[in-house]
């Protein structure tokens, strides 16, 4: 039997999440398997605009909607490294195919293509990622730290970062304010 994979799902932080790094976080899971899980927080701007990031890595970026877009805080692991979530998929040096339409790339060639107006149509850049060791994510879900729901690329790529958490919550079909973080028996 193949183990359950939550890749291509949203992890939505429960409203009572105490960890400030993950409070109101919306995580897109890129990988999940027996060795653990890896995802990107897709709703927390880092305060760095894409134009600034491109300037830091000596790539030209003309003014436009992309240049002013915020680079996101993707998570606490490797916060000095860039992770590019994009669609459509293409042939980059270091990429992970998440779905037939979404790819995670960590090589600079995708950024060079963006600076030359040859990059993917839809793109999110994060600094860092969120990672879980084997079984850790399952334990956190079992202890009511996270909700899971099928991802929606439109939420990640088309909505402003500050609207993504509530939009993902709406996918669940109920009012999250009714949730309790307490577990137990009556």
Image (tube, grey):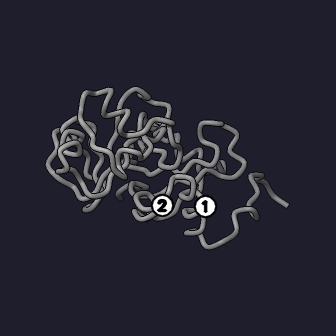
- Return the residue found at the far front: 63
Q: Residue at x 51, y 63 (%)?
A: 149
Quadrant assignment, res 79: top left
Q: Which residue is mark 2?
A: 159
- Quarter holding the C terminus is bottom right
Residue 87 higher or lower than 83, as above or below: below
Position in image of residue 136 (x %, y %)? 52, 40
Name of the residue lying farthest toward the bottom: 173
Residue 166's mark?
1
What x and y, as percent, mark residue 67? 35, 44
Crowd band around label 1 with a 10 angstrom C-alpha radius: few (<14), some (14–19), many (20+)? some
Task: Say left or right for 120 vs 37.
Answer: left
Which residue is more in the foreground, 31 or 3? 31
**178 or 119: which is nearer to us?**
119
Identify the residue at image location x=26%, y=58%. 121
Instruction: Left or right? Give the position of 54 relative to 186.
Output: left
| Element carrying mark 1 | helix
Residue 44's tag is none
Residue sitting at x 52%, y 49%: 43
Could you say whether the residue bearing mark 2 is in a helix, strand or loop?
loop
Quarter of the image that includes the N terminus: bottom left
Q: Residue at x 24, y 33 (%)?
A: 59
Using the image, determine if residue 88 lies above or below residue 77.
below
x, y percentage for residue 75?
Answer: 49, 36
How far apart are the two marked residues, 1 and 2, measured between alpha carbons?
A: 11 Å
């Amino acid at each position: 039997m193949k183990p359950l994979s939550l890749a291509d799902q949203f992890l939505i932080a429960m409203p009572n999440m105490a960890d400030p790094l993950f409070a109101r976080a919306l995580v897109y899971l890129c990988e999940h398997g027996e060795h653990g899980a890896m995802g990107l927080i897709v709703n927390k701007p880092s305060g760095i605009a894409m134009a600034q990031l491109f300037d830091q890595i000596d790539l030209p970026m003309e003014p436009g909607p992309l240049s002013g877009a915020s680079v996101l805080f993707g998570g606490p692991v490797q916060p000095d490294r860039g992770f590019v979530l994009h669609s459509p998929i293409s042939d980059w040096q270091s990429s992970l195919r998440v779905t037939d339409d979404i790819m995670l790339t960590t090589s600079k060639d995708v950024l060079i293509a963006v600076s030359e107006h040859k990059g993917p149509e839809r793109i999110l850049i994060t600094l860092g990622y969120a990672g879980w060791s084997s079984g850790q994510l399952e334990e956190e879900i079992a202890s009511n730290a996270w909700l899971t729901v099928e991802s929606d690329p439109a939420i990640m790529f088309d909505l402003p970062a500050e609207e993504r958490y509530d939009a993902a919550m709406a996918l669940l079909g109920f009012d999250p304010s009714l949730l309790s973080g307490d577990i137990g028996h009556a």
